[in-house]
Amino acid sequence: MTKKDIVRTISEEVGLTQQQTKEIVQKTFDAIVDCLVRERRIELRNFGVFEVKPRAARKARNPRTGQSVDVPRKHVVTFKPGKYMEAKVRDLDEMIDQLSANLSESTNPTDQTGGESNSGKPDPEPPSGRWDA
């Protein structure tokens, strides 16, 4: 999915023009970047945490030539997903596993092992925000 796809989806849901929505989305991204530069951390509830962390200087090796290369220290942005996002991705893994099991059952009719839907786990609590709508 690209930023243009995000803009199109939000525009249709909210009823704004794509140009208005594009400006809002871009301003949101700009605000996140500005906050990271100023405060080095931004926490978005039910989504995750972006944080600027220093990465130490190190020796690396050019894989093509095998020559040793000095890599200078730098700052990098890290992202730690929130609990809701992790739960949704975990559900995706379980759904793929279940589909694979169902496919193998349909190709092997002698195997009569039945699977439990949703692995017996309750759905994760929905977030209070609107980002997942």
Image: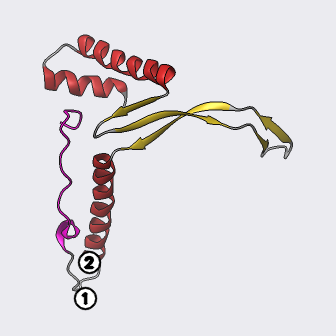
Outermost residue, front side? 39
Q: Any magenta on residue 118?
A: yes
Helix, strand or loop at mark 2: helix
How would you classify the magenta stretch by its main secondary structure? loop
Using the image, determine if residue 98 lies above or below residue 79: below
- The mark nearer the N terminus, 2 or 1, is 2
Where is the N terminus found, in terms of image quarters?
Answer: top left
Crowd rating for badge 2 (residues with CA inside 10 Å; few <14, some 14–19, many 20+): some
Please provide the residue range marked out in magenta. Answer: 116-133
Using the image, determine if residue 118 lies above or below residue 79: below
* CA separation in Å, label 2 and label 1: 8 Å
Residue 81 relative to residue 118: left or right: right
Where is the C terminus found, in terms of image quarters?
Answer: top left
Name the residue beneath numbered marker 2: 105
Using the image, determine if residue 103 lies above or below residue 71: below
Residue 129 percent location from the top left of the image: 20, 34
Residue 130 percent location from the top left of the image: 19, 33
Residue 15 percent location from the top left of the image: 13, 18
Name the residue beneath numbered marker 1: 110
Q: Identity of the amino acid at label 1?
A: Thr
Residue at 81% across, 36% down: 70
Crowd rating for badge 1 (residues with CA inside 10 Å; few <14, some 14–19, many 20+): few
Q: Which mark is residue 119?
A: none
Nearest the camera: 60 or 74? 74
